[in-house]
Image (tube, grey):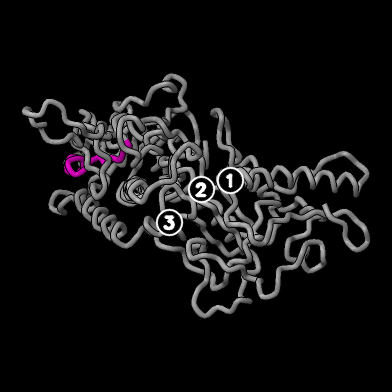
Amino acid sequence: MVADKRGRAKWTVSIPQNHAFPLSISQYADICAKCREVSGKVEALRSHSHTLPHTILAFGHDSEPQDPHFVDVREAEKNGLLPRPAAKSGLLKQSPDSDLIGEGRGRLAEESVCETSMTFVLESAEAGIGKTMMMLWTAFGLAQQEGRAFFIDDTRWAYGRYTDTFQAPQSKGCRAPPRHEILPCPRQARHLVVSATTFADIFGSSGNGLQAPQPIDPSVQENMFDLARQGYEALFRLNKEDGEYVENRVRELRAKRVVPRSEGEQDGMAIGVHVRRGDVHPLEYQYRYSYMPLNIYAETARLLQEDKYNHTGPNGLEDRAAKGHSFLILASDDPIVYESDEFAAASRAQDRIKLAGKPTTQNEEPDRRVMRKFVDENFGWEGGFFAPMFWNLGLGGSGAAAAAKSPASTPVPSAETIRLRSLIGRAYMMDLAVLAEASDVVVCTVSAAGCRLLAVMMGWESAMEKGNWVNIDGRYEWTSFS
């Protein structure tokens, strides 16, 4: 809390000018809590009321007023409410590792600071990458909507450097502001930072997801979808090698469904199937402690094909030809799924990077002349992606198994650990890219973040209006998060 020249109560956020950037996710969460507390106190002092404001952080309501008592950092420094930066330190010197992705470079003058901006910090307490991607895309869409420059910070991202997986987004031709001006709250801050921890503070209840099957406000649902779609279109550009592989793979799969014109005018149907297991369980009540049976995926795909090719009249021969060129495209975090009877004939979405099961990674037959051979226990992905398994990547040895269950309990990752994590992220993104681009229809479970991302990648018209995104996990509709 500060007082202006007339002695009126105001409030701002003060971060030391030489503090490392970004702050920890717990510090950002703490600042957001204090924003609400201090804003309420100032409002009470100004209005002699104990009614706290509830709208300063809310999302999507243009009619809601901004907090009139908040003073942004730049104005606070200019008016003497906060210490001014030291001479010629308008842009703090940052190490190369702290450069923000998307920031203008080259001949930009130091004065070329973006008027407003949003910085997304990729650090998250969750091991999975899907939810972070949805947040990233949605945050970008909001930044575009508000005319903010957009930057990405990958300083502590569990999957390594952002540019190892994706190409850097296009710059708006301006520099990021001094880091102490980048605030997690309130929403009206000139330069805003968003992370997984503070996402709900910016997006309100729209970012909380569904807890039970219930109607969703169509305008809110479509608005969130549109924001995420903007982010996907701008940011989903795989690194050059992976991008070229996906293009070739999609071209190959599309050609596979083409029916020779001598046999008919109708091509076959490519049905994408996304099977998430591991530590994500279905929302549907009867399967909530296990997994959706594989036969449900396969049966749904069969019914979709029958629904399209169900003629018995003159088109019957063409339908049979099209069925002969129809096939499944499979992506799963569990290697065993690829070997199941239900998907024995399915095509892998991609095989550039594959998660291997433990039997595949077994060493060669041990020397029988050696009584005991000491080797690290092999690491396989049976059952799918589990957070403890991810955090333990690269630690080696059975003694490390389940030792790290969160980022806080994980040792500083080595270069090899980061490399392995990056491979997992790249495989996941290539899987989704091929499914979204090569499939006519996608079958998946909305409880999985990848399933929800696929809908965004397919687009509203194809996924929602034409029904080409098929959720088999209960009567849930698409939502950003669950």
113 versus 450 height, above or below: below
* Secondary structure category for the residue under label 3: helix
Q: Nearer the viewer, residue 278 or 245?
A: 278
Residue lying at 58% horizontally and 46% vertically, measured from the top left: 25
Q: Nearer the viewer, residue 351 or 224?
A: 351
Residue 329 part of the magenta segment? yes
Residue 344 part of the magenta segment? no
* Secondary structure category for the residue under label 1: helix
Instruction: Please name the amino acid that badge 2 sits on.
Output: Glu
Residue lying at 49% horizontally and 32% vertically, measured from the top left: 476
Question: Residue 69 got which mark?
Answer: none
Examine the rendering and report whether any part of residue 252 can be seen.
yes
User: How many other residues sit within 10 Å of disc 2, few (<14), some (14-19) or many (≥20)?
Assistant: many
Marks 1 and 2 in Cβ contact (< 8 Å): yes
Which quarter of the figure has residue 251?
bottom left
User: How many other residues sit within 10 Å of disc 1, few (<14), some (14-19) or many (≥20)?
Assistant: some
Residue lying at 55% horizontally and 62% vertically, measured from the top left: 150
| Residue marked by disc 3 | 162
Q: Position of residue 313 (x, y in %)?
A: 22, 38
| Residue marked by disc 2 | 123
Q: Position of residue 440 (x, y in %)?
A: 32, 46
Q: Nearer the viewer, residue 335 or 295?
A: 335
Examine the rendering and report whether any part of residue 181 can be seen.
no
The residue range painted magenta reads 318-333
